[in-house]
Image: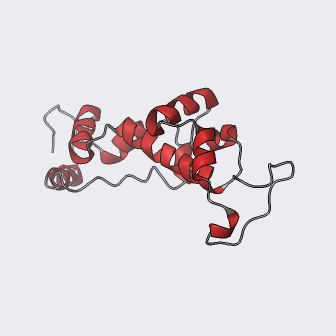
Amino acid sequence: MRGPIGRFVRPSDIADVRRTASVGASRKPHFPVSGGKHFSVARPVEEMVKRSRLAGRTFKRRFLQATGLTPLAYVQRLQIEDAKRRLERTDTSIEEISWQVGYEDPAFFRRLFKRTTGLAPGAYRKRFCIPDFARRRAPRPRRPGGRGTPC
């Protein structure tokens, strides 16, 4: 079957579009970009567009309508939330955390973190650090040369 632009369209593509169109604005799309492993995707928004099998503009418009955020803002929010969790629970350096959540430039990560949370990463760690005795799991041994405690 030929599509409107002349390329071949599989029947499953049509079913996917119908299913996506009937989802409604109350249901948020699920894209596995979080969870630690997926931050290594170089271009997460392009990967989401590819997986959705929609045109880029259509995907971004529907994503914004469903979540209230652009795809890039959504990915950045996930990365900042993961960084906040790491700052609260570990004594890993801010440079290492920025790398772990997908930012190669620690300066850009710091600016984005401060713009998003209102605090610099170091100030956030100082204010919201979870002490060892309050953690669910047993405290893990500290890195050699680490500061000793995460707070």
Which colouring convention does the figure follow? Answer: secondary structure
Place residue 102 in its image quadrant.
top right
Give the image location of residue 12, x and y in percent. Answer: 23, 54
| Closest to the observer, 135 or 51 | 135
In the rendered image, the residue lying farthest to the right is 144
- Determine the image quadrant of residue 99: top right
Quadrant location of the N terminus in the rendered image: top left
From the top left corner, tell me how far across and down residue 46 is, in percent. Answer: 40, 36
| Residue positioned 23% across, 49% down in the render | 13
Q: Position of residue 141 (x, y in %)?
A: 79, 63
Tell me the residue at 80%/58% (across/down).
142
* Image spot of residue 90 (x, y percent): 67, 54
Q: How many marks can you see?
A: 0
Residue at x 61% of width, y 72% of height: 136
Residue under the point 50% across and 43% down: 80
| In this view, 151 is above or below 3 | below
The reply, left or right, for residue 73 in relation to residue 17 is right
Residue 34 vs residue 122: left or right? Answer: left
Q: Closer to the camera, 50 or 140? A: 140
Q: Would residue 3 be found to the left or right of residue 87 on screen? A: left
For the question of whether residue 105 can be seen, the reply is no
Q: Is residue 1 visible?
A: yes
